[in-house]
Image: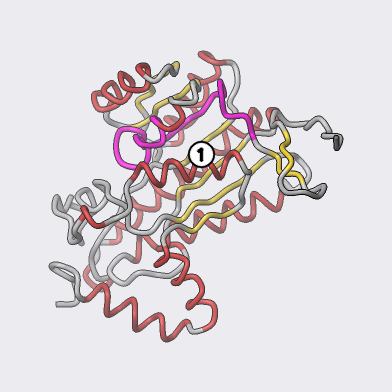
Amino acid sequence: MEEIKKSTVDRPQTIVGSGRWTVDLMNIKNKVIIITGASSGIGEATAYAFAKQHCKIVLAARNIEKLEAVKIKCLAFGAECLLVKCDVSKEEDCKQLIQSTIQQFNTINILINNAGISMRALFADLDLSVIKQVMDINFWGTVYCTKYAMPYLLKEKGSVIGVSSVAGIKGLPGRTGYSASKFAMNGFMDSLRVENIKTGLHVGVICPGYTASNIRNTALNKEGKVQTETPLDESKLMSASTVADEILKMIEHRKAEVVLTSQGKLTKLINKFFPRLLDKMVYNVVSKEKDSPFK
């Protein structure tokens, strides 16, 4: 029998194939996990995925009532839960989120930066406060939470995940603020990964394509008001639970990047070799959306 060396991180190794190639799998069970934006969509689905692994989950969002409903389901799956009302655009809220987690569970193994908001309007018509609000939540929320969680994540050789988007790979017309925030997140996480090559910290970014959630319903218009209606047929989009399962797997395998959907993978490939062709393709797709800003 081939010898399997004991992992320095709490991840049992498994032999894959017939040779000496090994894959480290992080043991998810009983880990302390913070999920921002946990009251709906991908964040809510991710909470359930980790609850089934009997984790200690910190659910963070602005709407505490919705978090209570998520907590009930997580408890039914066998998880321990802590609720923290948190607006990630506020640095002090993010600092308090980390402090509350440490007070309750003494450590942090995984941070999932999921909280996010979108927008939909032409830049020429846009009030600049809209881009600032999107950046404050999507980018600065990730920076704030990661900064205050870093000492504990480094100690545990844990994982920090950014839930990005295909819009962070290719700029989407009519969503300049959203794409900018996701490009910024990707750059921040990429730099953070390189900085921590020798520390044992896992830094991962997942880029879902269009996912069924309320992010388009709550997207901001040119004046910063909630649009309330999605321009897409949500029933035909990737489910939030599918994204959640992929997040769990990428943490187990400590992957640096995961791009979901065939459309997302194709977008990344075409953008690498034929970026101007993709410009036209993306424009044509967005211009056909319901109530497109190009009409």
Image spot of residue 261 (x, y percent): 41, 60
Vertical arrangement, residue 136 with respect to residue 1, above or below: below
Image spot of residue 264 (x, y percent): 43, 65
What's the amino acid at mark 1?
Leu
Instruction: Say few, some or many: other residues with alpha carbon within 10 Å of mark 1 (under 14 / 14 to 19 / 20 or more).
Output: some
Image spot of residue 21 (x, y percent): 78, 48
Image spot of residue 85 (x, y percent): 35, 25
Camera-nearest residue between 202 and 89:
202
The quarter of the picture where the N terminus appears is top right
The quarter of the picture where the C terminus appears is bottom left
Residue visible at 70% across and 53% down in the picture: 194
Q: Is mark 1 on a helix, strand or loop?
A: helix
| 34 part of magenta stretch | yes
Residue visible at 27% across and 30% down in the picture: 63
What residue is pinned by disc 1?
248
Camera-nearest residue between 105 and 1:
1
Residue visible at 24% across and 53% down in the picture: 216
The magenta segment is: 26-48
| 246 part of magenta stretch | no
Displayed quadrant of residue 4 = top right
